[in-house]
Amino acid sequence: MHTLFISDLHLTPKRPDITNCFISFMREDAIKADALYVLGDLFDFWIGDDDPTNFAEQIKSEFKTLVSKGVPVFFSHGNRDFLVGKRFAKQTGVTLLEEEQVVDLYGEKVVVLHGDTLCTEDVRYLAFREKVHKPWLQWVFNRLPFFIKTRIVRKIQSDTSSDKSNKSMSIMDVTPGEVLAVMEKHQVNSMIHGHTHRPNIHKISISGEEKTRIVLGDWYTQGSILVYSDHGYELQNKRFTS
Ligand code: LP5
Ligand code: MN
């Protein structure tokens, strides 16, 4: 009995090594799990559910096959795939989660989220996020032709990445007070998130209680998987084969 968590794969046709590792993971590992949670940034960037490429089809078909074989898949949006929408969910069978979602893992209530919203000192990012999350702006954007959207995204990516290069590592990590506030809001003692690319299991002792924050790793040089079972949890790596 175990559930798997992954995030921050940043899948792109430019990185077949990551894609191959993901496909092996889906066929060899995820198929044996009770459920799979993808906590955002599955894609390097998801421009829209109208993506016509073979690459998008290939990834969607892996999810569709897994779900059709009886493994439920849950998806939280990341800052790179916040435009994954209802059409993607319908085509794959994946269930889209709330921004902060409480899940029951073998009797333990755990809040799961991408993690970008925990970085409250990154005020320029949060201001940017608020803009691109405006429903009316997404409504308009989603109706543009795919090639126009691609151009807009490339331009904004270049503007944001030059801004990011001026930020300190500490600004881009979670704010401890925000972590506790989110756990408190949902009345849980455990949290699982990605985004920071700093895989770890943090134990926090506060007012005589122990809280746990599990951070998932990225897939830049290997697969990174959290195996959460009825008798414990472990962060594991999966080697790239090519
Ligand atoms: O993922 P990572 O670690 O590289 O960086 C993130 C934050 N960066 C981003 C940038 C996005 O991935 C780029 C997205 C392009 C989106 C196009 C959308 C098309 C319009 C859609 C309309 C519905 O997420 C980075 C964080 C970092 O995580 C760590 O937490 O710091 O944040 C930034 O670098 C953001 C900059 O600080 C913001 C700079 C603003 C530049 C002006 C852009 C114009 C805004 C136009 C809005 C429509
Ligand atoms: Mn992210």
Image: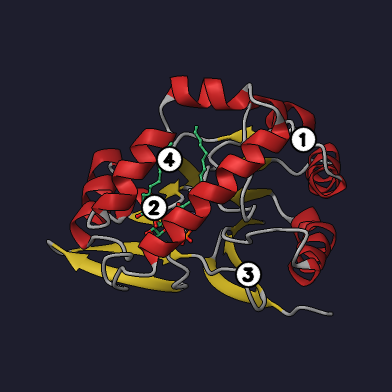
**Three-letter code for the amino acid on which mark 1 is drawn:** Thr
Marks 4 and 3, the one that precedes in the sequence: 4
Disc 4 crowd rating (10 Å Cα; few below 14, some 14-19, many 20+) is many
One can see residue 117 in this view: yes
Disc 4 secondary structure class: strand
Residue labelled with disc 4: 102
* Residue in the picture at 27% in, 46% down: 182
Closer to the camera in the image, 114 or 166? 166
The answer to whether the residues at label 4 and label 1 have Cβ atoms under 8 Å apart is no
Marks 2 and 4, the one that precedes in the sequence: 4
Alpha carbon of mark 4 to alpha carbon of mark 1: how far? 23 Å
**Three-letter code for the amino acid on which mark 4 is drawn:** Val
Of badges 4 and 1, the one in the foreground is 1
Relative height, residue 218 to residue 45 (above, below): below
Residue labelled with disc 1: 92
Relative height, residue 15 to residue 135 (above, below): below
Q: Is mark 2 within 8 Å of ligand 2?
A: yes
Disc 3 secondary structure class: loop
Alpha carbon of mark 1 to alpha carbon of mark 2: how far? 25 Å
Relative height, residue 52 to residue 158 (above, below): above
Residue labelled with disc 2: 116
Marks 4 and 1, the one that precedes in the sequence: 1
Label placed on residue 219? 3
Q: Is mark 4 within 8 Å of ligand 2?
A: no
Q: Is residue 180 left or right of residue 81?
A: left
Residue 210 location in percent, x, y? 26, 64
Q: Is residue 195 left or right of residue 130?
A: right
One can see residue 109 in this view: no
